[in-house]
Amino acid sequence: MSKIEGPYAFVYVDREQKHVWYARDYLGRRSLLTKTMDSGAMLVSSVADTADESTAWTEVAAQKIYCVDLNARTLDGGILEYSWQYEAGGLEIGAEDEHLVLPFGRVDQTVDDIGPISDVASSVQLSDLAEFPDICKWQPYIDQLKSELTQAVKSRVDSIPPNGTHARCGVLFSGGVDCMVLAAILTTVLPRDEPIELFNVAFENPRQTKLQSLDSVYDVPDRKTGRLGWNELERIDPHREWRFIECDVPYSQVIEHKPHVQQLLVPSCTVMDMSIGIALWFASRGHGTRVTATSRTEYMGQSRVLLLGMGADEQLGGYSRHRSAWDKSGPHALAREIALDVERIATRNLGRDDRVVSDNAKEARFPFLAANVVAFLSQTPIAYKMDMRYARGVGEKLLLRLLARQLGLVQACVLAKRAIQFGARTAKMESSQTRGQDFL
């Protein structure tokens, strides 16, 4: 198993030995749930059977591989666990069945290389990172990140079967730096005659509509940055057919499909889960309007594989808590926070996201969570991934922003982080009093 790279979830029945093996990949990129019945029987499934029993289902822990011994009298004594480990001295990958060795190491928390911020850096606005100081020191890391991400994107699209003249691969697209870099790299690895679909979702939010005067109820933050990003991609690669699809979601459709999405979320069951999940569900469905410079036509997405930017924020310091750690306690606290976030990627929400996207007969693929990318970023010093001494929209995910600038993404490279529930306006649709951690 240590030699297998990529997302998976499986249940394998060994009839001869009377064993049942089940697991998710070590980063939890595919969904797998378990539930123990009153009779003592155990169910293993990629989705829950009902939202009414959300507390009965649990996500299979991604850090282990499980084996049920059907010869045992009870489940309690009949489940063996094999844990993934970081490579240690003298342990060879695949040496023993019980040794599951992760293909990347722990996050390097070294902060010794953080030098004084230059006078140029503090005085220049860095509106497009063109005047970024000490770029020569960063260049090897920028080039390596580009190489690792290119390898990750290529390996995730080469396996997609031909689809005639239809698009094979799309990007869930807000116009932010994560998805912009993925799209810019994707166009370098796909054959020139293949279109690329960019799915940009926007919601009618009745509460926001009352508070603001908008030209359109779908004129949400992610729509504005999405259009700017689409224009940038057309500028850096004018020969590619970029299909920008505006997925507009009326509030009535939210009400109609909310029970179905809530069932897909199980065992996740908070207001924030719904805000994120419903945005991913409608975006991955791909129903919308294809926009060109001269026309708007109804469109149904063709891609069966979608690239998503999950994993960039955890590894590159994209969350507000990372800046808070820096502000409160400095670089060592930031390094610890990044290491903690990377450690718990496997326990977060990738299973939830997989259930939501897969419901639309699409497969989510995550280049930022490719083993080679995680390995490179884990061994890269904190000082060459982010620098919170710079302003918001520059300091966080700085390494990725510098790569974006090198790829020609002048506007995207300085866009601040914005969560999908706020960018697409799925948060607080009915009331401003609801909190993300509240249960549905």
Image (tube, rainbow, N blue to C red):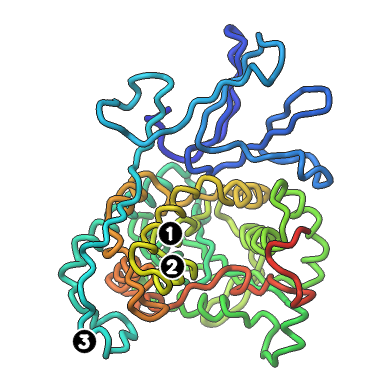
Q: Amino acid at mark 1?
A: Glu
Total labels drawn? 3
Q: Which residue is mark 2?
A: 325
Please name which of the two marks, 1 or 3, marks the residue nearer to the observer: 1
The residue that appears at 66% across and 13% down in the rendered structure is 70
Mark 3 nearby-residue class (10 Å; few <14, some 14–19, many ≥20): few
Mark 1 nearby-residue class (10 Å; few <14, some 14–19, many ≥20): many
> Separation of disc 3 and disc 2 at Cα?
25 Å
Secondary element at tag 1? helix
Is there a contact, CB below 8 Å, between mark 3 and mark 2?
A: no
Q: Amino acid at mark 3?
A: Val
Going from the N terminus, do you reach mark 1 or mark 3 first?
3
The residue that appears at 29% across and 26% down in the rendered structure is 91
The answer to whether 95 is drawn above or below residue 197 in the figure is above
Q: Which residue is mark 1?
A: 337
**From this viewpoint, is residue 165 visible?**
no
**The quarter of the displayed image where residue 1 is located:** top left
Of residue 347 and residue 299, the one placed in the foreground of this image is 347
Q: Which residue is mark 3?
A: 120
Please name which of the two marks, 3 or 2, marks the residue nearer to the observer: 2
The residue that appears at 41% across and 54% down in the rendered structure is 368
> Separation of disc 2 and disc 1 at Cα?
7 Å
Q: Position of residue 302 (x, y in %)?
A: 58, 56
Q: Position of residue 60 (x, y in %)?
A: 61, 36
> Separation of disc 1 and disc 3 at Cα?
29 Å
